[in-house]
Amino acid sequence: MKRLIGLDPTEYEHPEDRDALDKLESIPGVRKIAFKIWEVFLDKVWYIQSTGSFVEVNKENSPKLYSIFINACEILDFDEIPPLYINNAGDINAFAIGVNRPFVALSYHCIERLNDSEMSFILGHELGHIKSGHVLYRSIARKFQDYLKQLNLITLGLANFPAAGVEIAMSYWSRMSELTSDRAGLLVCKDLDAAITGIIKLSGFPSNDCSRISYLDVEKFKETFKKQARDFESFELEKLNKVVRFYVTKDMSHPWLVLRASELIKWLESGEFDHIINKERLSSEEKTEINFCSKCRSEIKEEDKFCGKCGCKLI
């Protein structure tokens, strides 16, 4: 395990993520309303639900899983380890949430169906959302209109706020943020096959004992899927297809699985992954001389009162 000391999320940020976020935050009032929604509706609710209904994982009750989680945190250079929970969701799922008190949660089905390398990828992916400061907008993206109806925008001085346009922009950015977090997951597991099978297992691919199914050759399946991803990349190069992609995915929470695999393959082959892994980094002593935001790990200046990356108030 190599800790990527001083790792800045912009080092592995997907350009579609950055472009979509810039467009979203260029809409006046977006961040103000997002923080208000979080403060009014979600902060205490999610904290109470996680501590009251989920089972917290630690080194005593699940030493192996917690060790994988700690390893992922260390690789991505987290100084503060967020809580890890297990919930009883009815499908294979994982998520990161929380602005002031971020945490990661896994469904029981993740534990049942992921091997160690795939689990490293999934945990790295979710930690990537926290490190990049994604959790604020992602937490409200799917029910943005519902929350707005309960806020008095006039009292916020935002009576003409373009709600429909923001919902579209936020939903699109939320999908593109997955591409950045996939890269964080790959930095943790360092295994393209594990990353790809982790992604497709989230969609219902057979579990770890699927080798007993005589009509499914798992290794050949993975190779076929990677070829499909490479072919999909050439399809995506046409500008018209990006327009089509927007309309057919606008109600989805995640990008197409093949697109996610395609983008990981392309990033790995570009050499950027190896550059980050092999980059000469500051020692632990040198690192302490530089200030970083405690939420998203972006570099900050001593005189800053707010993080320029995630907007977090600095102590």
Image (spheres, rainbow, N blue to C red):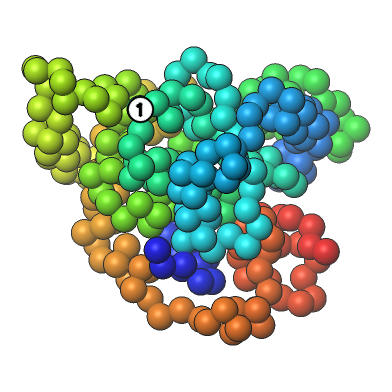
For the point 62% across and 57% down, the residue is 296
**Would residue 157 be visible to someone looking at this image?**
yes
Quarter of the N terminus within the rendering: bottom left
Q: Is residue 292 above or below residue 173?
A: below
Q: Is residue 125 above or below residue 299?
A: above
Q: Which percent across, then down, holds residue 62?
A: 53, 38
**Would residue 42 be visible to someone looking at this image?**
no
Element at label 1: helix
Quarter of the image holding residue 158? top right
For the point 64% across and 35% down, the residue is 56
111 and 280: which is toward the camera: 111
For the point 27% across and 36% down, the residue is 197
Give the farthest residue toward the right. 155
- What crowding class fits label 1: few (fewer than 14 Cα within 10 Å), some (14-19), or many (20 or more)? many
Q: How many marks?
A: 1
Q: Which percent across, then down, holds residue 176?
A: 44, 42
Residue, disc 1: 113
Quarter of the image holding residue 219? top left
104 and 130: which is toward the camera: 104
Quarter of the C terminus within the rendering: bottom right
Q: Amino acid at mark 1?
A: Arg
In this rendering, would 176 be left or right of 268?
Answer: right
270 and 166: which is toward the camera: 270
For the point 21% across and 59% down, the residue is 269
